[in-house]
Structures are given as C-alpha cells and as structure tokens.
Amino acid sequence: GAGVSQSPRYKVAKRGQDVALRCDPISGHVSLFWYQQALGQGPEFLTYFQNEAQLDKSGLPSDRFFAERPEGSVSTLKIQRTQQEDSAVYLCASSLGPRGGLRPQHFGDGTRLSIL
Amino acid sequence: AQKITQTQPGMFVQEKEAVTLDCTYDTSDPSYGLFWYKQPSSGEMIFLIYQGSYDQQNATEGRYSLNFQKARKSANLVISASQLGDSAMYFCAMREVNNAGNMLTFGGGTRLMVKP
C-alpha cells in the first residue's frame, strides 16, 4: 500500500487480557518504529527494528510488552496481561533508511487501545 | 531534562493570517534533524517539514517554513495564510544521528485553532 497501515484501528480489552497490534510498513522501508501516545501528550518511543533485527527496545515500559518483525516487513506489538495504564494510542512508523539516516518517519493512523 | 520543549499548549489564529509555533531543543550531538508533524483530530501523524543541523538555509514546504536558529537551539514552525483545515495538534521532534535507536523525540505539542 501507499502508506503505513495499522490494525485494528480501535481495540477494547478487559484488564488482564493479551492484545496484539499489527503494523504493515511502507514497502521497502528498512526501519520500523513503535511509539506510545498518551492522551494529550506527544508520542514516546517504544522500540525500533532495522529489517528483522530489533536494535532498540529501551522504551518498552515492562516485560509485558513484546514486539517482533520476523520477516523484516510486518510487525506485531503484543501486550500481555494488559493494565489500565496501557490505554493509549499506539503508533507505528517506518522510514526508508537504516541507522544513520535522517529521512522522515511516516506514521500510520494508530491503534487506540482502551483497557477496561 | 526535556529534549524538545513546546511552550505553547494552545494557539488561536485568524484565518488567512500567519502563525508561529515555538520549539526549542537540547542536544550535544552535532548532527541531528528537526521535524514538524501535524496531528488532526482523526489521529494520523502527518509529516510537514524537516531541517538538518548542517543545512545553511531555512527549510520551506509550501505554506510551511522553519525558522531555524541554531545558536538559540530553536526551530519554530511558521504557517502562512492559515486555513481552517490547519486546526490540529502540531508536534516538534528531533532525531540525533549518533543515537543508536534513531528514534524521534517529541515535544508535548501545540494545539492550533484557526478562527473563521
């Protein structure tokens, strides 16, 4: 597709359930990023992939958060045993260049996660 | 310390007038990029404009221009001839070349409201 695609657009889950969020980056984009955006705030970095390698996961808030990109294209962000504080918009972004590039990141529409 | 500071939580501008959104940043990396993104109420993050730390001229993209003052560490966004569709959240972000993760660090955003 032309842009970054994320699904689902909205997700409601009960506290304690596991959720999986999908990101389909722009074709050919090497770098993929996940961000978390709390209501009324700027996005905060979660994790970064270069192709299939997860080079930085320093922003993941706990070991309940797990991300993968097994074939270097589609990525999944999984949150286990969800908590209310996980409620946020999860944004995926991709960019053409690998490490060292300053090309802009292109974002998807995000997944709005609500934990009841 | 905050890496990106946007001091204006909200701004009003009259339609067809120009508006400046402030952004200051903090980095010790000599090579970095500064980005502005627009986020309408629908949630998608739209890339607007980019300025590299070594660029000699201020970046311009249509009605958007970036007033880059390196010594002051500021990168203000100027929108000329405001339109009703410009009403949105605006985020300033920075990417440091020597940062291993290549992530964007965002400010807290400015909500711009264009009055008819």
Image: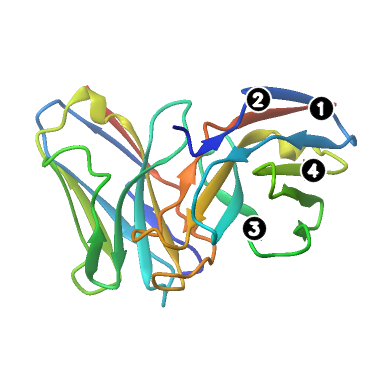
Secondary structure under tag 2 reads loop
Residue to which mark 3 is pinned: B50
Single out the residue that lies furthest toward the bottom: A28
Position of A103 with respect to A7 (left or right) is right
**Mark positioned earlier in the residue sequence (1 or 2):** 2
| Mark 3, other Cα within 10 Å: few <14 / some 14–19 / many ≥20 | many
Q: Amino acid at mark 4?
A: Ile
Kindly identify which chain the residue marked by label 1 belongs to: B
Secondary structure under tag 1 reads strand
Label of residue B8 in the image: 2
Q: Nearer the viewer, residue A41 or A25?
A: A41
Label of residue B13 in the image: 1
- Disc 3 to disc 1, how far (Cα)? 23 Å
Q: Amino acid at mark 3?
A: Tyr
Is the same chain shared between marks 3 and 4? yes
**Residue displayed at 22% across by 63% down:** A54
**Residue displayed at 49% across by 41% down:** B106
**Mark positioned earlier in the residue sequence (4 or 1):** 1
